[in-house]
Image: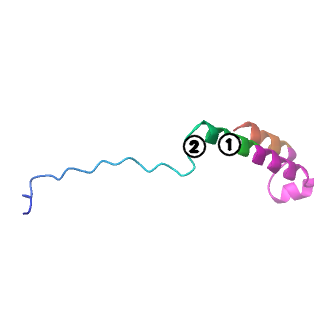
Amino acid sequence: MKNPPNIRQPMALSLPPEPATMPKNLLEILYVRLKTGYLRRRNRRILLALSDDQLKDIGLSRSEIFSNDRHR
């Protein structure tokens, strides 16, 4: 049986899906923070190993390597 045109159908409520990267417990939060810190240090070491000309080619200066990390 069809609904009369003047009656609105209730909207189904749903929660937004939880991102796969959202940590679910304390151990996951700790793991994500440690991994993030490790990756930042690794990337900083790699960038510091480049010459000034190489850094200029990718649009960075030595001071930006440290300043970008402090803003996080």
Residue at label 1? 31
Q: Tell whether 28 sits left or right of 16.
A: right
Residue at label 2? 23
Q: Secondary structure at mark 1?
A: helix
Residue 11 locus on image (x, y percent): 24, 50
**Disc 2 residue crowd, few under 14, some 14–19, many 20+, Cα 10 Å:** some
Task: Give the residues in magenta.
Answer: 38-62
Which residue appears at 75% of the width and 36% of the height?
70
Which residue appears at 55% of the width and 42% of the height?
24
Q: Secondary structure at mark 2?
A: loop
Residue 33 locus on image (x, y percent): 69, 40
Query: Quick check: marks 1 and 2 in contact, CB under 8 Å?
Result: yes
Q: Main secondary structure of the magenta part?
A: helix
Which residue appears at 84% of the width and 48% of the height?
61
Question: Which residue type does callout 1 highlight?
Answer: Tyr
Q: Does the magenta-highlighted stretch encompass residue 23?
A: no
Q: Tell whether 16 sits left or right of 25.
A: left
